[in-house]
Amino acid sequence: MDTLSTRWTQLEPHAIVVGPDDDRPRPAVVLFHGCGGMRPHLPLYAEAARAAGWRAFIVDSYAPRGWSRAYALATVCSGLQLRGDKRAGDVLAALNGVSQRRDVDASRIVLAGWSHGGWGIMEAMSSARTPGTLGVQNPGEITLDGVKSVYLCYPYIGIAALNRMRPWTHCPKTLAVISRTDHLTSVRNAERVHAMVRNCGAEVETWIAEGTHAFDEPTSAPPMRHDPDLTAEAIRRFSALLNDTAVAPQL
């Protein structure tokens, strides 16, 4: 089983880094893709972060494992492997690695997850992080204190997310995007889960987007459908969360 540092050593070469061309310590947002892997909508959010003066790190959980998109669709999207609790190991490892960079302000970090990525973040926020859990040897050796906000875009909170109602141990400001016609969850279930997060003391804003799961992904396939207008609004709200979390140094 990997340590946090070993996992980041595997992930880092495949992470996409977007940000101002300087070495100033800046607030950072770490982005985690859905079960379909790296898709073309994530760089749009990363560019919005760069425009706000932030650094963005898009973490690929599949390339280090040698998994193709087809393989991930068949195994991860079906729940056969790398469920949210194990994906949380990638979340913690990336947080640990990014926080040690000289060009990152480790006290001002946002975690952002889409679908399966959101599931992984929620597991990281709610787990007791005892040794050997979340797919890594030492999950408790990284503090979550620097995580000031979380962006959850149609996070997976369906039947396989067994811990979706487990209270969070770290409760940062949260923006949760709910898709009205999400085939993986009902609005009622999503609101119930996010209300639980709010009860732990977190400031939780929910936005019900009048679209499908993965509405912001240009290559989405039925029953998912891309909606450019909703995508633009999602990116606007994402940017607003960053600006509300921390004012970055001027470009």
Image (tube, rainbow, N blue to C red):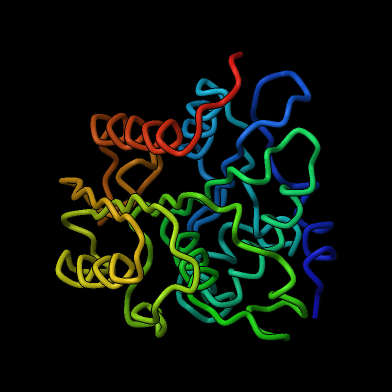
Nearer to me, 186 or 138: 138
Residue 132 image point, x, y percent: 72, 86
Counting every numbered tag in the picture gives 0
Q: Quadrant of the C terminus?
A: top right
Residue 129 image point, x, y percent: 62, 80
In the image, 12: left or right of 111?
Answer: right
Nearer to me, 212 or 24: 24
In the image, 108: left or right of 211?
Answer: right
Residue occupying the point 54% across, 74% down: 75
Nearer to me, 245 or 39: 245
Q: Quadrant of the N terminus?
A: bottom right
Residue 100 image point, x, y percent: 79, 48
Q: Quadrant of residue 27?
A: top right
Nearer to me, 44 or 195: 195
Q: Is residue 12 above or below residue 138?
A: above
Residue 83 image point, x, y percent: 53, 76
In the image, 163: left or right of 184?
Answer: right
Q: Is residue 233 above or below residue 149?
A: above
In the image, 172: left or right of 98?
Answer: left
Residue occupying the point 48% across, 27% down: 48
Q: Quadrant of residue 85?
A: bottom right
Residue occupying the point 33% across, 68% down: 197
Residue occupying the point 56% across, 26% down: 248
Q: Residue furthest top?
A: 251
